[in-house]
């Protein structure tokens, strides 16, 4: 049996939103470091944090103060710190942060991927950007066009999908067809309308694509916006759609799980969804 040990970190905000983005970043990094070190000591091979993990989820506002929380990738401070921990523990780390593009005034919701030797493999920019009450993301993020990269890490073929992306089945399928065996979905989602979907969409995507998924959500509430409770419940779901391990609703937590990677081929051989696809008939889906 081929095992992949995954880790997911969910966390509440550790500084007031009245503080500067720089102060908040330092507080969040300081809070994450003990859990990153714990993951390394427990032999985690692929670790992922929540969406924009160094900052609050500031999208209920339309305040350009938060543009100051952007960082370059890979040259910014957070990626450099994560490269050090990746090399120290021989651990792949997915680093979801707010990215400043080389073009002034252009920003993305991005996840950098660091390999187990500390080298930078590349990044995925969030493709689907919501623009509804409480989630004014187009004010902050330009839609990414990353073309579904799959990262050949030391331990697995890894895909990344970010938060709102999970509502769109096309990206899951594109990542799986490109070879992804394990896909992480760092998120920031609150109780209410979408909570029941949290238990449905990623398991359904795992079944449809015969892959493992690690879903990560933050916890707590964030003033002054208070749009709802970030309900945690980060989890690992297997290619049969079964949630094998899940975090609490309201605690800072690292969850660690050993994934049976042989199950990927077993499930794909059993269902043969990729064989039976009919892409020759799907053009109306993209032409519409």
Image (cartoon, rainbow, N blue to C red):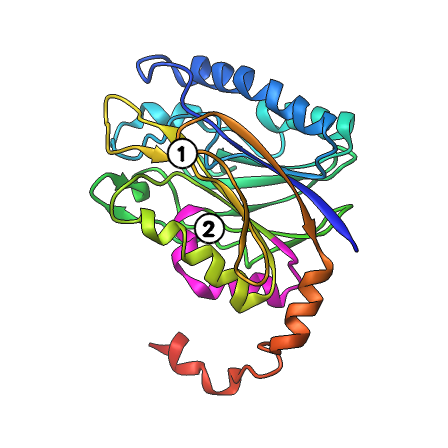
Which residue has dot 2 on it? 144
Image spot of residue 5 (x, y percent): 70, 42
Q: Which residues are magenta?
A: 163-182
Residue 172 lies within the magenta run: yes
- x and y percentages locating residue 25 in the rendered image: 48, 19
Residue contact at pointers 2 and 1, CB within 8 angstroms: no
Determine the main secondary structure of the stretch shown in magenta.
Answer: helix
Residue positioned 62% across, 29% down in the render:
79
Quarter holding residue 251: top left
Report the front residue among 203 and 151: 203
Helix, strand or loop at mark 1: loop
Q: Is residue 248 left or right of residue 38?
A: left
Q: CA distance from mark 2 to mark 1?
A: 30 Å
Return the mark for residue 249: 1
Around disc 1, counting alpha carbons within 10 Å, would you say few (fewer than 14), some (14 to 19), or many (20 or more)?
some
Ranked by sequence position, the earlier of labels 2 and 1 is: 2
**SS category of the residue bearing label 2:** loop
Instruction: Judge whether residue 60 is colored magenta.
Output: no
For the residues carrying marks 2 and 1, which lies nearer the camera in this image?
A: 1
């Amino acid at each position: 049996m081929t095992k992949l040990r995954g880790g997911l970190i969910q966390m509440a905000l550790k500084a007031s939103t009245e503080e500067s983005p720089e102060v908040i970043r330092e507080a969040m990094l300081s809070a994450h470091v003990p859990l990153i070190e714990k993951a390394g000591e427990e032999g985690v091979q692929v670790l992922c944090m929540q969406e924009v993990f160094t900052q609050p989820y500031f999208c209920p506002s339309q305040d350009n103060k938060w543009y100051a929380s952007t960082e370059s990738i890979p040259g910014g401070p957070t990626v450099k710190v994560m490269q050090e921990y990746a090399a120290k523990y021989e651990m792949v780390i997915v680093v979801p942060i707010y990215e400043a593009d080389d073009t002034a005034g252009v920003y993305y919701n991005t996840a950098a991927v660091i390999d187990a030797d500390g080298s930078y493999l590349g990044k995925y920019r969030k493709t689907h950007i919501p623009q509804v009450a409480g989630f004014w993301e187009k004010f902050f993020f330009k839609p990414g066009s990353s073309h579904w990269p799959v990262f050949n890490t030391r331990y697995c073929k890894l895909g990344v999908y970010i938060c709102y992306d999970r509502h769109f089945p096309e990206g899951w399928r594109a990542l799986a067809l490109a070879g992804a065996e394990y896909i992480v979905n760092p998120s920031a989602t609150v109780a209410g309308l979408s909570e029941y979907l949290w238990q449905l969409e990623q398991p359904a995507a795992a079944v449809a694509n015969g892959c493992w998924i690690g879903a990560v959500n933050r916890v707590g509430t964030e003033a002054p916006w208070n749009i709802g409770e970030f309900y945690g419940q980060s989890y690992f779901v297997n290619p049969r759609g079964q949630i094998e391990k899940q975090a609490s609703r309201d605690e800072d937590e690292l969850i660690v799980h050993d994934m049976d990677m042989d199950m990927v081929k077993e499930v794909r051989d059993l269902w043969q969804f990729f064989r039976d696809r009919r892409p020759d008939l799907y053009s109306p889906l993209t032409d519409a």
